[in-house]
Amino acid sequence: MNTRRLLTRRNLLLAGLTGVGGLLLFGRTKKLPPTYGHILRMGDNLTYAAHRLLLPGQSLAREYSRRDITPFPAVFIKDTSDPTHPMSSESYRRLQAGGFADWRLRVEGLVDRPGTYSLADLKRFPARTQITRHTCEEGWSAIGEWTGVQLGRVLEAAEMHPDARFVTLHCNDGYVDSIDLLDALHPQTLLAYGMNGRDLSLPHGAPVRLRLETQMGYKSMKYVEKIVVTSEFGGDEGTIQDGWSWYAGI
Ligand SMILES: Nc1nc2c(c(=O)[nH]1)N[C@H]1C(S)=C(S)[C@@H](COP(=O)(O)O)O[C@H]1N2
Ligand SMILES: [Mo]
């Protein structure tokens, strides 16, 4: 195949829904199982294996239409009385008042191009909008419209190393959690900056939150400010320590 055809094919793939993930995952998936087998708790491991077996590749979460959108209750906000919580913090409110112009997202770890992105930088990537159902482990669910950049595109720009396996996200309220590359590169996994046609609000995680449509609501991290690519399982501080399962596939 000549270079031109290769490039065309690559562009076509990138334009497609599964392009980013498909390209990057090729040749990587076979390296995944041993890591999980050793480190995950048995229950997680079984759920994980079952999902990966039943839903190979990148099956999409159901998408809804505009008329299905429900008013989104911002129910899961931990203790916002802590003055450092983004909902209460003076400096965070100043950041918001300035349209988050001074906000930055850091991408680092096992990447050739670590970097710092402004909100405007993220908005320069192609945007994706999807209407999906958020399901909280506490028993409520709601449908909302999300707009953002596919996490896979940002990871692609960062040029991950071949041994990359996990992506850990750090949030301004101290929440830290990780996902595997399959979920990170899933076409519906977004760094979302818009909700229901507006800028993401502070209760919902402004300026940027993760939308992870393949797992329960608590994995859709709000106030994301650092992304670290790793080869080892870790960054589970936000879930396993709280008694929640690391893998919460739906
Ligand atoms: N940084 C951060 N992200 C978070 C949480 C949180 O407390 N902090 N709560 C999680 C939980 S349990 C849920 S159900 C959703 C709630 O999202 P919403 O407030 O937009 O409805 O955010 C998730 N992401
Ligand atoms: Mo939740």
Image (cartoon, helix red, strand yellow):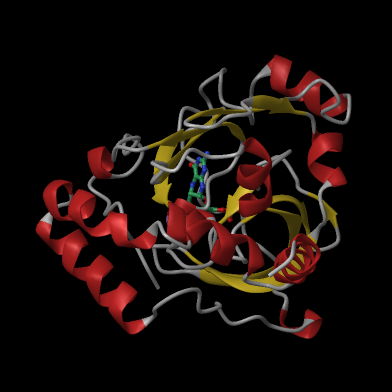
In the image, 114: left or right of 122?
A: left
In the image, 55: left or right of 199?
A: left
Percent of width and height locating residue 6 = 72, 65
Q: How many marks overall?
A: 0
**Residue shown at the point (63%, 73%) measured from the top left:** 132
**Residue shown at the point (36%, 38%) measured from the top left:** 238
Percent of width and height locating residue 145 = 74, 67
Q: Please tell me which residue lies in front, 2 or 71.
A: 2
216 above or below 225? below
State the image quarter where residue 176 is shown.
top left
Indicate the quadrant containing the N terminus: top left, top right, bottom left or bottom right: bottom right
Indicate the quadrant containing the C terminus: top left, top right, bottom left or bottom right: bottom left
Percent of width and height locating residue 110 = 47, 31
State the image quarter where residue 232 is shown.
top left
In the image, 23: left or right of 214?
A: right
In the image, 130: left or right of 160?
A: right
Q: Please tell me which residue lies in front, 93 or 24.
A: 24
Q: Please tell me which residue lies in front, 73 or 5.
A: 5
77 above or below 43? above
187 above or below 242? below
Q: Please tell me which residue lies in front, 120 or 206.
A: 120
